[in-house]
Amino acid sequence: MVSVSHSVAAQSDFHQFLAILSGGLNEHESQALSKAVEFAWEVYGEAKLGSGERIWSHALGMAVIIAGLKLDVESRMAAVLFAVPAQIENGIVRIEELFGKPAAHLVNGISRLNRLRPITKGFVAANIEAGEANPAEMKAQIEVLRKMLLAMVEDIRVVLLRLASRTQTLRYYADHPDELRTQVARETLELYSPLANRLGVWELKWELEDLSFRFLHPDIYKKIARMLDEKRLEREQFIVDAVARVRLELAEAGVNKAEIYGRPKHIYSIWNKMRKKGVEFSEVYDIRALRIIVDDLKDCYTALGIVHNLWSPISKEFDDYISNPKGNNYRSLHTAVRCPDGRSLEVQIRTTEMHKHAELGVAAHWRYKEGSKRTSEDDYDEKIAWLRQLLTWKDEVADSSDWVNHYKQAALDETLYVITPQGKVVDLPQGSTPVDFGYRVHTDLGHRCRGARVNGQLVPLNTPLETGQQVEIITAKVGGPSRDWLNPSLGYIHTKSARIKVRAWFANLALEETLAEGRTLIAKELQRAGQTSANLEELSHKLGFSRADDLFIAAARGELNQRQFQAVARGGDLLTETQLPDEVQTRPSKPVEGNQGILIVGVDKLLTQLARCCKPAPPDEIQGFITRGKGISIHRMDCPNFANLAALHPERVIETDWGQRTTGVFATDIVVDAHDRQGLLRDISEIFTREKLNVIGVNTQSKQGKAHMSFTVEVINLHQMQRTLTLIHEVEGVVGVRRA
């Protein structure tokens, strides 16, 4: 057990200590470890850590913990030598020369994590108060910080060494109270004990939590300790006796292959359950707990019967998650029993397969304990589960070299984690640059990015970032991105999101330039027509545009006929519709899709076109208007433009109707007003897809939480369009939908 020695400094028999430290090692490994201990003693002397603890004592305490975890000789040497790089020059090189590259590699990993310590310390301290105002954001940031700690190391043994170091620090503070210990305890509960939990290092988890809880809430800790009314060793003996009784009864029942183990619930866990469930101490029935793992389902219920026969079941404390699994497919039998002396005992019973699923699958123990639901980060969770599996596997193999090799190859995360100057952790894909970082923090920060400092040093903007670095963006007061950033060969941008934001900026810039050019052209045309005070919105509507910006864009792109504009600006009508035709075309119209099946009263086979201003579709009531050179323009009877034209030139109105059979599709405009939300455009587009409507034009605007959308779609008839309008109106957030 790790708890064999809580104070290495008190070891009087050095040889006895070395025997503890070398447990499970061969003679050659023990000699190498002894050599490392002697070297560390010479280097450290009386030097102390910031906590006040002697480095020598801390190193030996770490080593005892690592030995208790049954890690390899390189890990134990690294624990002893952890502070050598900070005490002598070229410490890593010296360790490699004397004790080999593997030990040097681990010590270097510890040094990297130690350099991160000021960041994590400041982060936790700064976010405690902020977390009270925004607990969700703080929780997310803490989670990212945990991942960053894991991503900083290539060898998971470094994480275990860091956990051992933190455990030894808390042990020191337990014997030497200091005002700093509350801050260290808070950091431990937020970062290190959850990591120990996730990696399944239960021996360290409970001690980290109990000591931290003791420092943060000493009164509550003492109260619960008194309520337990028994020493830890007594509680552990109770578990040993209970395991023996259950094993004997199972053997007599023919269940010989059963794994039975347990551990009394530690004080922090008891308090956490009382707090979360709002129950009294007397209602916490799993202060002492057993877990029984058997081969098959039948044996689960056999074991349950034996447990209920040995002790009295507590009412309403039995749950059959085998017959009724939890939502995450967690399966197990849970029961609580009362012993003759009045003490309660929780028992969990499951098969080996169920246990593997509970510990390593979607119902992983750490998810359950931390109250989290399964998220989309399955890859990360699977890596954690795999590492936990390795921790279990090491107890089953004689030669530890196999699992050590796997540890060395453990790539925990393909994400890198960097820190803002304010201490916020930002996650980015591997290969990201300062430009990606800027856009990840805020779009405007990315646009105005002109330089970057990494760990205080100026670097080029295409420099790949690494986990643990602090990144500061140097900005201009105004300005935008460089077009060079979009050149893949220059390596300024790695993430897709940053690339999209840069392209959007240039697209908006081009649009603004187009609008400015069009606005200038329209102003000149109005000045030429002597109509500088004309209402641009009304003028746009008369010309068939929904808004003035569309008019400006058409002018800039050369799509606006100047004669048409001049005629309308002076109060007239469209030029093409103000002049009588020289002759009515009697040749058959070309088969233009959507314009077939229109009957002109008195004349057969005239060239016809559907007016763009009102976009008629069957069975709309329609009328025709004779144009010059473009045949008959077909309008809806309620079209305002047609009303103006008919008032000015009633002689050119011609009676028109749809034929008995119309063919093709008809373009029509649909206007949607809605409360803006994420996914609104997607939901509406899905309706168009489901109704098999071809969308040929889209215009969306969002302002102050309101969305205004205009769609031009091709429909077969008015019935199809009406059905579509009804479906769109049922979309969440839509307040109005109409045909334009």
Image (cartoon, rainbow, N blue to C red):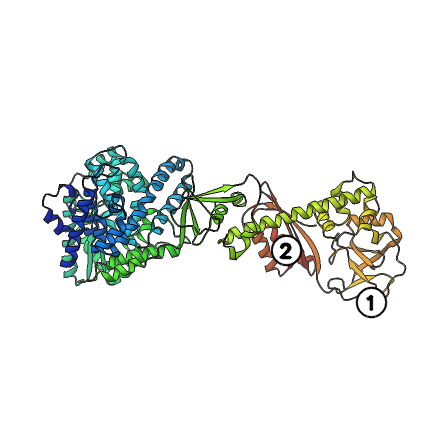
Q: Can residue 331 be seen in this view?
A: no
Residue 47, percent across and down?
21, 39
Task: Using the image, determine if residue 396 lies above or below residue 44.
Answer: below
Disc 2 element = helix
> For this rendering, which residue is in front, 223 or 558?
558
Q: In this view, does 204 lie to the left or right of 472?
A: left
> For this rendering, which residue is in front, 127 or 460?
460
Disc nearer the start of the sequence (2/1)? 1
Q: Quadrant of residue 88?
A: top left
Instruction: Using the image, tell me which numbered label, if any, was put on residue 378.
Output: none
Residue 351, percent across and down?
26, 60
Q: In which quarter of the image is residue 383?
A: bottom left
Numbered disc in front, either 2 or 1: 1
**Residue annotated with mark 2:** 724
Amino acid type, mark 1: Pro
Q: Is residue 131 left or right of residue 711?
A: left
